[in-house]
Image (cartoon, rainbow, N blue to C red):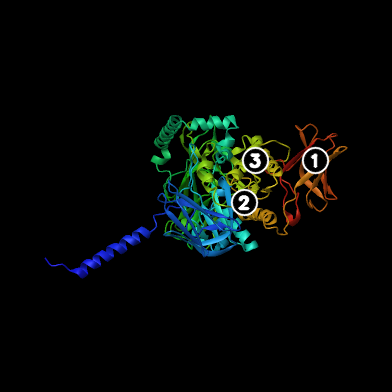
Amino acid sequence: MSFNIRKHFSEILILLLTTFVISDAYGEVKLPNLFTDNMIIQRNTEIPVWGYSDPNEKINIEFKDKNYTTVADHNGYWSVKLTPSKEGGPYSLIINDRTINNVLVGDVWLCSGQSNIDLPIYRVEDLYKDLTDTLQRPNIRLLKVPNATNILDKSEDIGETAWRELSPENVSDFSAFSYFLAYDLYEKTGIPQGVIASSWGGTPIQSWIGQDYIKNYPNYMSELLLVKDDEYVDNINKASHIANSKWSNLLYKLDKGVHEKWYSEDLDDSDWREVSQNNNREWTQTEFGPFNGSYWFRQEVDIDKNYAGREALLRLGCLVDADSTYVNGVLVGNTGYQYPPRKYKVPKGLLKEGVNVITIRLIGGPNAEFVKDKPYKIVFDDKSELQLSEVWKFKYGAHLPSKNVQGIGMQNSPTACFNAMLYPLRNYPISGVLWYQGESNTSRPKEYQQLLENLMNNWRTIWNNDTLPFFVVQLPNFMEPTHTPSESGWVTLRESQRRATVNDDNAQLIVGLGLGEWNDIHPLRKKDLAERAALEIRKKIYKQNVAITPQLVEGEILDDKVILSFTDEIFGNENGEVFDFEISEDGRRYYNAKATIKNNKIYVSNSNVNHPVSVRYAWRNSPPSANLKGKNNLPLPTFQWDN
């Protein structure tokens, strides 16, 4: 047998080289989901970089021409801290065989709360479409924390996500408030900006607080213990699912409108009565009492020949609660709950010259309604519009009892969002927190001050930063205006928000007053609100010389008047009058008060009150005449002063 020495030597050499390469190669590195291409890291501070690999694996990190090395522990965990950097980029962050591209250094903000942080760009595009369709800012980075819950333990990582550059093609689903905040701060500072949006619609504040603080609230602690019982939660949710399924099946079975196709274009609706969409008491109340079930509405619209066959958008404002909507017998859209605006695309070829029929099947209870002062119209592709009539043909579908079995949404449970969506962010340095929440806590508004103080302390503790800044949005005006003194959970919670920030040197209130909508808990002017927040940040963090909202400093009683002082100049109308003030002699019964600015102080009085002890400003859900302003027309918050 012949032996090829040259070939044998070559094989040995290849084997040795392969062995050398393998022994020198890095093991696979697993990074937190915060570390992706397009990320932004906080300037002027040490930046932790951490992750997992094989136990005892050597980790080599390269960033901005500097090398960092460490070795994973016996569990595979490793971490290093990058040297502080000033703003700049983009850079590459190389970790063994992993490369993260397009990394910026700048300022990072955490925006958290419930639905008004969640509210995405596409919901506000009516106001800002020209901006959001054209804005391209590679130095602004956005990250959305995926919704998740954990009531058993603190999570170490968020769900899979990715940083993105601000550009028209990737912002439609992103938090509008966070988007406009980053945009305004970047335009006014030139520093790259990043926002982390960690929020969930409808969640109460106790869901965003850790158990170390929740244990001080017996009601929330007992709730937490209950939802930790899998059998309890499973049985309630199973019962809810079965009950809702059977309710929906029965509604379908009993609804003549479905089976007789009341949505048909050629239906004879001559026996249907006419109702006004703006008078829901007319059609939600029967001679036997409140109605619950399915309501049917039909309306004819006349389409000019120039618009026949063209694509259009049917806008039906907001409807309470769920709807299915048809045009000429064709389903064009449905929505399962009350809050989203109804914007249904009418496809090309569906509209015809002459009479067309719009049909709505609305499912709801005695509070069912067409929300007033919303757009109800057809918008054509050339932006021309056809307003719908407020008068509809109307008929009841099926009458059912209300749904009585409600499931447990784990996101609303104490600690659930804190553990899963907040705690995993703790090692990622941030400049500050924007907190916009409270709508889900208005049934217990007085405890909110303490809860908010606990939340701020809790988050500062896990970030190991006692001075972490918080900017808290005070709830805006909402619900119909009232002209006489009254109590409500909405306005009381506003005061709890204000007092929590007044007591904290590193917290600032963002005034929402004037930017709300009486008929919508999700007001659309998120750019204006973000600009107010940015003003406070620019003053407090960037030390810019900008006007911010004056704060109440103190009050004093002089005879039958209360005199209020503020941190900066204040203004009323041209005569110095300020409206929507109330005054009380006992702290329980309040009277509308006369309020006048003199020498930058407000004098408040009422002829029926001789010995005042308390004053309130704009103490209504939607104060109709509140006009107390600071410089640049910035409104003051609602407040209460007590002797």
Location of mark 1 (residue): 593
Residue most extreme to the bottom: 6
Query: What residue is shown with label 3?
Result: 453
Instruction: State whether residue 16 is above or below residue 521.
Output: below
Determine the CA span between mark 3 and mark 2.
Answer: 15 Å
Q: Secondary structure at mark 1?
A: strand
Residue highlighted by disc 2: 432
Q: Is residue 238 visible?
A: yes
Give me the C-alpha separation between circle 2 and circle 1. Answer: 39 Å
Q: Secondary structure at mark 2?
A: strand
Report if residue 136 is visible in the image. Answer: no
- Give residue 627's position: percent from left, percent from top: 75, 49
The one of 89 and 282 positioned closer to us in this rendering: 89
Whole-percent x, y for residue 432 in the image: 62, 51
Q: Earlier in the sequence, mark 2 or mark 1?
A: 2
Identified by mark 3, the residue type is Glu
Q: Position of residue 270 (x, y in %)?
A: 47, 43
472 and 132: which one is in front? 472
Whether pointer 2 and pointer 1 mark residues with C-beta atoms closer than 8 Å, the reply is no
The tag earlier along the polypeptide, 3 or 2, is 2
Along the viewing direction, whichever of 431 and 640 lies nearer the viewer? 431
- Residue at 65% x, 50% y: name it: 515
Decide: few, some or many residues near mark 3? Use Cα within 10 Å; few <14, some 14-19, many ≥20: some
Of callouts 3 and 1, the N-terminal one: 3
Q: Nearer the viewer, mark 3 or mark 1?
A: 3
Instruction: Characterize the local packing of mark 2: few (<14), some (14-19) or many (20 or more) Cα atoms within 10 angstroms.
Output: many
Residue flagged by tag 1: what amino acid is it? Ala
* Residue 309: quarter of image: bottom left
Is residue 217 positioned above or below 311 on the image? Answer: above
Question: Horizontal placement of 526 versus 560: left or right?
Answer: left
Q: Is 602 positioned to the left or the right of 369 in the image? A: right
| Image quadrant containing the N terminus | bottom left
